[in-house]
Amino acid sequence: MGSYLIRRLLQAILVILVVSFLVFVLMRMLPGDPIEMLISSSMLTDYTPEMMDALRHEKGLDQPIGVQYLRWLGQMGRGDFGTSIMQNYNIRNEIKDRVVVTMMIGFAAWLIGLIVGVLLGIICAIRRGKLIDNIVSVLANIGLTAPSFWIAILLVYLFVMKLHVLPLYGYTLPWVDFGKSLKQSIMPILVTALGPIATTTRQTRSSVLEVLNEDYVRTAWSKGLNEKKVVMKHVLKNALMPIVTLQGTMLRMIIGGSVVVETIFVIPGMGSMLTKSMLSHDYPVVQAVTVIMTAVVVLSNLLVDILYAWIDPRIQYS
Amino acid sequence: MSRLLTVEGLTTEFKTERGIVRAVNNISYTVDSGEIVGVVGESGCGKSVSQMSIMGLIPSPPGKVVAGTAIFGNTDLLKLKKESKEMCEIRGNRISMIFQEPMTSLNPALTVNKQMSEMLLEHKSISKKEARERVIDMLRQVGIPDPESRADDYPHQMSGGMRQRVMVGMAMICDPALIIADEATTALDATIQAQLLEMMNNLVREHHTAMVMVTHNLGIVARYADRINVMYAGSIIESGTVKEIWANPLHPYTESLIHCVPQLGQKVEAIPGMPPSLINRPPTCPFLPRCKYRQKCCFEDPVQELTLVEGTHSTMCALRSGGAKNEQ
């Protein structure tokens, strides 16, 4: 197990390195230039080409791309994420604040998706073909196919414009003002959780259905266990594998979704930071955010693999 | 000996795309306490389905018990719902079952101890620790070496024979009145099969447990059972003690079946033809198309029920029951 973990961690670092390099190069291949963006946004018209070159030199953007990458990598290795080209803030401090916001919403959405999805999936499977199964299956398909921004707009229309019960935008941390935080988070969490709920429901339904036909479930019935015990003790643990696998993907979905949701509801999280920095070609910010998101996804996949061994005793790592 | 189970007119049907399959057709039999009853017949003749019907384990839909009663104690098992509390109290506790597939019948995610003690905790009021002790004792009785450490094994760490021993132990652990062994040893090789049967026989005799032994192997039944029910195409076509049936098989199917038991130096005689489709079955004897003794009266005046011939020996064959016997 120990050597397996070390091997997987080394692999994870390799993946993060490759992603960071690709992002680094691709960003610089995009048309547009951060220095020009900076000047146009600062509305200074009397910038001479010499002054622009000086600025470029100051930000280190006149170096060959390889040198730039290695220099940035060294910086990252020391835990220094650099400063924003556009707004001159310290990226590390900014991320520290924003990561909490994204995690609060993302984690809540993931938890809701997991609990609601698994419960609905089990209900559908054991009441297969009944009314409840049909209703939930249709809803799950809608939840899966409807774009999140569209759902967000509908929610805003209903709760903000018509019913006036929820605030339109913004975010407050729960320990600052819990009531306000709750009201502000309901819609973003709901929109983010919709995909995970739908996907988890469908996956749970199909894997529970599969396990229900297994011989050992018949054995469980023959022991005189009631339906609840048969499902909870004998079916669920065996049906869990594909559901856990899915959770790795789910996290990716939630992180990707945060980009859209945080932009719509004007939430100061990682997602909106990424969009803003992408649009303004703020290279170091984009790089820092992508590296962190990649790390979260890679490590969560590792966690999923470790969980396998706990669920299925037949799996052993060496 | 007291009567344990009385089954009357049990009929089970399955809905399929091609029509309604009557897998079990109006069968009646009894089981007394402490006796071993063999149920023999070829694949698809309704042996397993009849036993599953009694346990309320028929997958429904598509299966359904459409008629009959199965009186166990004072309850009619066929009236109880699969999930009902009464049924759950009987299942595993008063009647338990051993299934055919040792490789897939145990839950791969739970240890042997968990799967066995679960039954004790469900049906008896004892602590987890006591349950574990009972499990280890049971494992020893079914011949698992080093049961203290083996109890914490997962099924995949055991061989097929050991898993089936665990299944037997599981069926015995609540000390039920009746065990239904559905092809319990079929999937195992001959040596292990013999060991396991010997062990099962000793155990049920020792605990005075009744057993219904479902198998397609007439040899096994002849060795261990007290009475035999021969099934063909969903019906019991002959019933009697082992001696009666072995010495004087009445139904032509039983006769052919006995000829199919391999004997040293003799050629095995196969039964020509195939068993009939169970959809839209004709009212005549189901064995008629394959029967070498068939006569005009078989077509004109078919027998629908077991007729007692002598002693406890009864058959469904029109020619061999009653007056028609001498006409062959």
Image (cartoon, grey):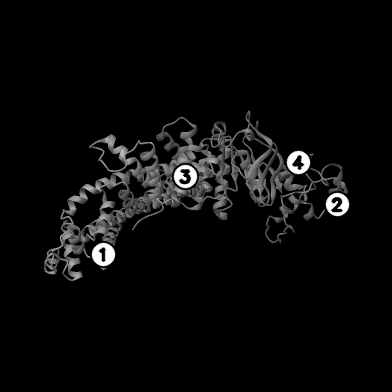
Amino acid type, mark 4: His
Image coordinates for residue A19, horizontal then vertical, percent: 28, 62
Between the C-alphas of marks 1 and 4, the distance is: 90 Å
| Contact check, label 4 and label 2, Cβ < 8 Å | no
Crowd class of label 1 (few under 14; some 14 to 19; many from 20; radius 10 Å): some
- Residue B139 sits above or below residue A256 on the image: above
Chain identifier of the residue bearing label 4 in the image = B
Task: Indicate the secondary structure of the residue bearing disc 3.
Answer: helix
Q: Earlier in the sequence, mark 1 or mark 3?
A: 1
Q: Do the residues at pointers 3 and 4 share their chain?
A: no
Image coordinates for residue A79, horizontal then vertical, percent: 17, 56
Crowd class of label 2 (few under 14; some 14 to 19; many from 20; radius 10 Å): some
Where residue B313 is drawn, which disc sits there? Answer: 4
Between the C-alphas of marks 2 and 3, the distance is: 59 Å
Q: Earlier in the sequence, mark 4 or mark 2?
A: 2
- Residue B191 sits above or below residue A17 on the image: above
Residue that carries the numbered disc 1 in the rendered image: A27
Q: In the image, A284: left or right of B185?
A: left
Amino acid type, mark 3: Gly
Quadrant assignment for the C terminus of chain A: bottom left
Q: Residue at x 68, y 57 (%)?
A: B263
In this orientation, does residue A247 appear?
yes
Q: Do the residues at pointers 1 and 4 share their chain?
A: no
